[in-house]
Amino acid sequence: MKRTGLFAALVLVAAAFSLPAQAAKTDFTMGLVLEPPHLDPTAGAAAAIDEVVYANVFEGLTRIDRNGEVKPALAKSWTISDDGLTYTFTLNDGVKFHDGTDMTAEDVKFTLDRAMAEDSTNAQKALFEPIETVEAADPKTVVITLKRPTGHFLFNLGWGDAVIVASETAETNKEKPVGTGPFRFVEWVPGDHITIEKNPDYWGNPVALDKATFKIIPDPAAATAALLAEDVDAFANFPAPEALPQFEADPRFTVVSGSTEGETILSTNNGKPPFDNLKVRQAIAHAIDRQAIIDGAMFGLGTPIGSHFAPHHPAYVDLTGTYPYDPEKAKALLAEAGFPDGFEATLKLPPPSYARRGGEIIADQLGKVGIKLEIIPVEWAQWLEQAFKGKDYDLTIVSHTEPMDIGIYARPDYYFDYHNPKFNEIMDKLAAETDTQKRYDLMREAQKILADDAVNGFLFELAKPGVWNAKLEGLWENSPVQANDLTEVRWTE
């Protein structure tokens, strides 16, 4: 080889060895089925809010991790008095809101006082009812005194509804959320996407992602196409279970089937005739074939339930046999209730595929026993306004994804309009009980009451089919809370 040729070859070899390894990606796009109505988790019930901002933009004193366990968050430690009434929290050092202001005990006091206030718009105001007083003892110390011992108080503080906000920005968090989390809000293009970016001044462990985008894709077919084209990197809650085999056969993707806290129910307006009649509700329960709904709407994904409780919880009782599928029994009960020829009603269906697909099947099932349903598709904002807030509905289908939320049936003005003093008494005992086994016994008793009263059509526990790029790690397989926690998400290459 000529000397010039040898020199050129050596230069090329040296250059090859000096090239840096290809850096892992630092941006990420997740598909979302439902667009949140706004971005303030302390002022709205929609799960889609927490799915964007929980643990990413906003943080609470505690947090719920991927295993459903309570962990420190803005509070690095706490002590509990012997009588169970006084919680003293010590806050982490150096915590700032995204606008640069310090987060102190005064912000904690403001947040909790605001959530408890008479004019509070917090969707889970009942979480804060046990609180007697909140005191900012010094900038880093918060003392919370309870009215009575509350066994699940630390868990309650980990809900998205209990994240800490600043008085200066609380009123504008719906459009421009300002939290303390590892990501800060960048933009929201309604109907299209929400973008957050890495917070360079985060007080805790920095995240691996520089930017994350939540892409709004409500249509199952469009969600499938977006993943296959790699326009989105992940769907933590994939809306097209019929397409899962296609992704399982594609090495580009990871497919997981996790669990959720989502009790999917045929919500029933118990305060409105004829649904205020127990025999009518029992007839509806007997007319429902849960497995046919799971197979037809969810392609087999989902666990049948007979009450409002998650099957993976140790206190779960299988009550699906309380009112087994029996159309003839349903017709007889309707006749006893004064409706031998059935009746007409409406079924309002929000956008999720479990509701739209499941609604068609339920309408057919109830039609066979004489209950003729008019299906009314509604958008999520309409559902929240009409059904959830206004009780303007007969029947609807929704998945309640809040953790351990059986207590909603004791709320005096909840949209089911259900009232049972015995159930409420059990909830009061549960709130004060700290012994685990005694709590489980109360939970079992509560499940039985709801099943016997046929409060709602209890359908199935929502599964969590997730599909994402095989090079991603750190996404949650299960949903112990309604969240897409991105704090541990990273690309492996």
Image (cartoon, grey):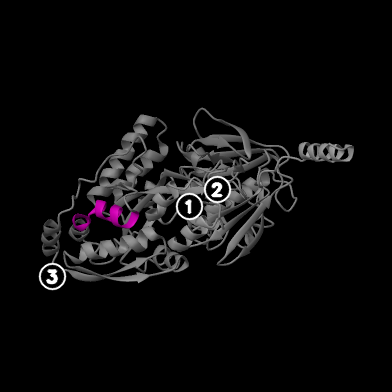
Residue at the extreme top of the image, as rendered: 82
What secondary structure do most residues of the magenta stretch adopt? helix
Q: Is residue 18 left or right of residue 121?
A: right
User: Range of the magenta residues?
Assistant: 285-298
Residue placed at 49% from the left, 32% from the top? Answer: 84
Circle 2 sits on which residue? 162
Residue placed at 50% from the left, 56% from the top? Answer: 228
- Relative to 276, does residue 206 appear above or below in the rendering? above
In the image, what residue type sits under mark 1? Answer: Gln
**Secondary structure under the numbered disc 2 in the rendered image:** helix
Q: CA distance from mark 1 to mark 3?
A: 41 Å
Residue 171 position, x and y percent, is 63, 61
Q: Pick the residue in front: 48 or 431.
A: 48
**2 and 3 marks in contact (CB < 8 Å):** no
Residue placed at 62% from the left, 47% from the top? Answer: 109
In the image, what residue type sits under mark 2? Answer: Ala
